[in-house]
């Protein structure tokens, strides 16, 4: 894989941090939801954010 620029690295860090924040928030919202459909919505959103973060992390390996 070719080298990434400093700007690209900064952008990746920013995106990864955002997805991590979203993952944590959605997970917390899911844990507090009482309606099952709302809980599932937040669980799915949490998993999607986690998956996106992990996919971006591959660029750093």
Image (tube, rainbow, N blue to C red):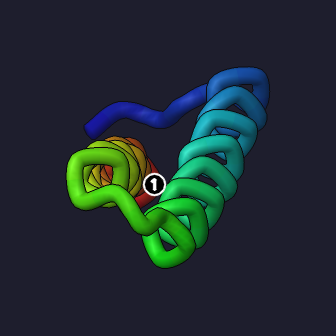
Q: Is residue 56 above or below residue 6?
A: below
Foreground pick, 16 / 34: 34
User: Residue 9, image x and y in percent?
Assistant: 66, 37
Residue drawn at x 55%, y 73% is 32
> Which image quarter is the C terminus in?
bottom left
Which residue does the numbered mark 1 point to in the structure image?
60
Residue drawn at x 76%, y 35% is 10
Residue drawn at x 67%, y 42% is 18
> Which image quarter is the N terminus in?
top left
Q: Is residue 17 above or below residue 14?
A: below
Residue drawn at x 59%, y 49% is 22
Label 1 Cα neighbours within 10 Å, binned few <14 / some 14-19 / many ≥20: few
The part of the image, by quadrant, that contains residue 60 is bottom left
Q: Is residue 5 above or below residue 29?
A: above
User: Residue 40, image x and y in percent?
Assistant: 23, 54
Foreground pick, 41 / 52: 41
- Judge from the rendering whether residue 3 lies leftward or rightward of residue 45; answer left or right: right
User: Residue 37, image x and y in percent?
Assistant: 23, 47
Foreground pick, 18 / 46: 46
Furthest-bottom residue in this view = 31
Q: How many marks?
A: 1
Furthest-front residue in this view = 35
- In the structure shown, which secondary structural element does the residue marked by tag 1 occupy? helix
């Amino acid at each position: 894989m070719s080298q990434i620029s400093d700007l690209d690295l900064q952008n990746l860090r920013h995106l990864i941090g955002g997805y991590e924040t979203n993952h944590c928030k959605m997970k917390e919202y899911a844990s507090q939801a009482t309606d099952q459909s709302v809980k599932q919505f937040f669980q799915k959103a949490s998993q999607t954010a986690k998956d996106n973060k992990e996919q971006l992390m591959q660029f750093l390996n």
